[in-house]
Image: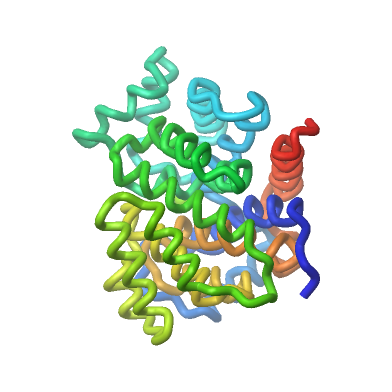
Amino acid sequence: MDEPSLKSKFIGALVGTGIGDALGAPFEGRSKVKPEDIDGIADRLASLTYTDDTHMMIGVAESLVRTGGFDGEDMAQAFTKNYELEPFRGYGPGPPRIFRLIRAGGAWDEVAQGLYHSGSYGNGSAMRVAPIGMLYHNNPLVLTGVAHKSSQITHAHNLGKEGATLQAYAIALATNLKPGGTFDRSDLLTKLIGFVSDRVYKEKLTQIQALLPHPDKDRVITELGNGIEAFNSVPTAIYSFLAHPDSFAQAVRFAISLGGDTDTIGAMTGAISGAYLGIKSIPGGWRSKLENRQYIEELAEKLYHLFLGTD
Ligand SMILES: [Mg+2]
């Protein structure tokens, strides 16, 4: 396979989020999904419509590009404005409450703290984190700080922040790998295990190591999870990628076939796989049908230029 350029990886991660989200959305909440049903939906639909996952990922990218890096107030305003323009994107109950508080003048790093006692540990900050994983793919320290702060806007629980950071770091590691060559999956897992601090993530990542040699969908669902909690979905997306590293379509199809929070696990798997394989790995029929594809690709290019420091 041709080695993808770094720019192709930036576009792959952002478009990959959108494709995984849009393909998974029709199956959200189902138990297992047949892979042929996923292809059937993709063939039948004239347009692949994304949900809040991609809508918020766009907000992250817009804000990073506009301010030339992370600005919490600007990002909170971007989420709020985008939600107000398109509230029909399938947002859960929490974020709209936060957006109202932001609109009323609440501080971006305080409003989410009061939600669900000590903040949410849902996967809502991990699902949108691809632009942060890409922009800081060569700087884990800055990546960690920015991923944490970006999560604080809506998902302030430590497990939510750590889930977003883990997903961003998985994207960063995938960006730094060359596809098509030898790829040591256990080396990547060792890096991820060393990177996270919470026990629940360390245990799940260790479990991936045990599951990879013996693919078993039921065990993946039972042991890694397919739910809306960050710790029941980010490791599942990492597994879905690692079990199918050389095929974007196979990785995303597998992620969605697990059922549960299919749009988000699809989006997160698509982000990691797209960051590894680049945009050309995404089937043309899927790519061409993605809603607002051109805008998402333009954002990815701007983010790439911001990375290069040439913008
Ligand atoms: Mg969604």
Q: Where is residue 36 in the image (x, y as percent from the top left)?
A: 55, 81
Percent x, y of residue 140: 52, 45
Horizontal arrangement in the rendering, residue 186 relative to residue 55 (left or right): left
Q: Can residue 22 be seen in this view?
A: no
Q: Which of 288 and 170 is in front in this view?
A: 170
Q: In which quarter of the image is residue 173?
A: bottom right
Query: Who's the residue at 25% across and 27% down the image?
Result: 114
- Counting labels gives 0
> Which residue occupies 30% across, 46% down?
159
> Relative to 136, is 210 on the left or the right?
left
Q: Where is residue 75 in the image (x, y as percent from the top left)?
A: 53, 28
Foreground pick, 64 / 35: 64
- Quadrant housing residue 28: bottom left
185 or 83: which is nearer to us?
Answer: 185
Say if residue 151 shows up in the picture. yes
Nearer the observer, 199 or 131 = 199
Identify the residue at horizontal 56%, vertical 36% (top origin): 60
Q: Which residue lies furthest to the left in this view?
A: 117
